[in-house]
Image: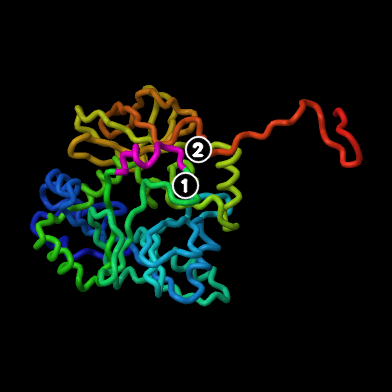
Amino acid sequence: MTGLVSPLLDRPGAVPAAGPDTGVAWHYGDPTAEQRALERGGAVVDQSHLGVVRVAGPDRLSWLHSITSQHLQDLAPRTSTELLVLSPQGRVEHAAGVVDDGEATWLVTEGSHAADLAAWLDRMKFMMRVEITDLSAELAVIGEPVDAEGIDGEPVTWRDPWPAVAVGGTRYGPPADEHPGAERAWRLVLVPRAELVDAVAAREAAGWQLAGTWASEAERVVAWRPRLGVDVDDRTIPHELDWLRTAVHLQKGCYRGQESVARVHNLGRPPRRLTMLHLDGSGHLLPEPGAEIRADEGGRALGAVTSVARHHELGPVALAVLKRSAPSDAELLVDCDGGAVSAAQEQVVPGDGVSVDRPAARRPVARGVTPRRDGPASMI
């Protein structure tokens, strides 16, 4: 964790968040009203627990292009995208929102990952003309429900591209205009930490309400939006979370993990799949992240909950990662302290594990015939 504590936690009624959101408020006394304000576009959320890494230097975009999953070579100033850093096996190690201001590239990531991401980038720079700086202690992040890029005169701003399918990406879930995330406008604005309180106060003066992460996380969960450090474990590949939409360019050149990404997309199937769960709230029980999911009482685990939220209209909901073989239409049971709760699925990544543009399988021209280099085809 960054270890930073927001001054907005001094507000009357502020309840601190826990886990990956430690350091900011979970809510300020009325989470339902805060979420409604956020949904209608009239709230600001303290996200100052997030990390910020700045990459400067003339080689920054071509270098980031060569070592991450995203096409960044010609990224225009104030155009937002996101990238993944993958292991050689294609597993997600880091994720970051990306925007360039014409002088530097800004990476916004989880606070607990910022220092490690900056250290990894520093190890990878070799002779490239780049400078990497972790500015998490100097810059704070605020979230707002605005569907617009930053403009000249505004602070550095990252607009969340989810759930649009970026150029070079693909999808496992529904098209963007049918996706529940299409209704969620969200961007992150970078301000000096010393100006965080004033930046929030200016938005409150314009009629916005200060909201906590209860509200923003509920909106993220119902938008099926994956989050590093929450929905990602040490086995996660981006296909499992439908993350090829916004974070992976399938036609760009080689980078670490690229072969594994291409192989699963073209020939294989992701071993797990993301689903959203509508939880039975009648018993007032909520699972914790990591809670196991089963098809029946005492059955084997089919997966685990990754994110849990209370939505002001949908009630208790969760994101979960299940084995691909888990039945996609079955009601499930989720382990809770106090007894299991039932859950209905809303499928995010389909059980067949096939993206919408997977190349068709090649078929032989004639069964049992193989070409010869020195003459006509022969039988095998």
* Amino acid marked by disc 1: Leu
Quadrant position of residue 318: top left
**125 sits left or right of 140 in the view:** right
User: From what the image shows, is residue 121 above or below residue 92?
Assistant: below
Q: Are marks 1 and 2 in contact (CB under 8 Å)?
A: yes
Q: Residue most toward the right? A: 374
User: From what the image shows, is residue 380 above or below residue 161?
Assistant: above
Q: Which residue is mark 2?
A: 355
Q: Position of residue 320 (x, y in %)?
A: 37, 37
Q: What is the number of the mark on residue 244? A: 1
Q: Quadrant of the N terminus?
A: bottom left
Query: What residue is at 20 percent from the left and 72 percent from the top?
Result: 195
Q: Is residue 67 magenta?
A: no
For mark 2, does the 10 Å Cα neighbourhood hold few (<14), some (14 to 19), or many (20 or more) residues? some
Q: Is residue 174 magenta?
A: yes
**218 sits left or right of 319 in the view:** left
Q: Which residues are magenta?
A: 171-182
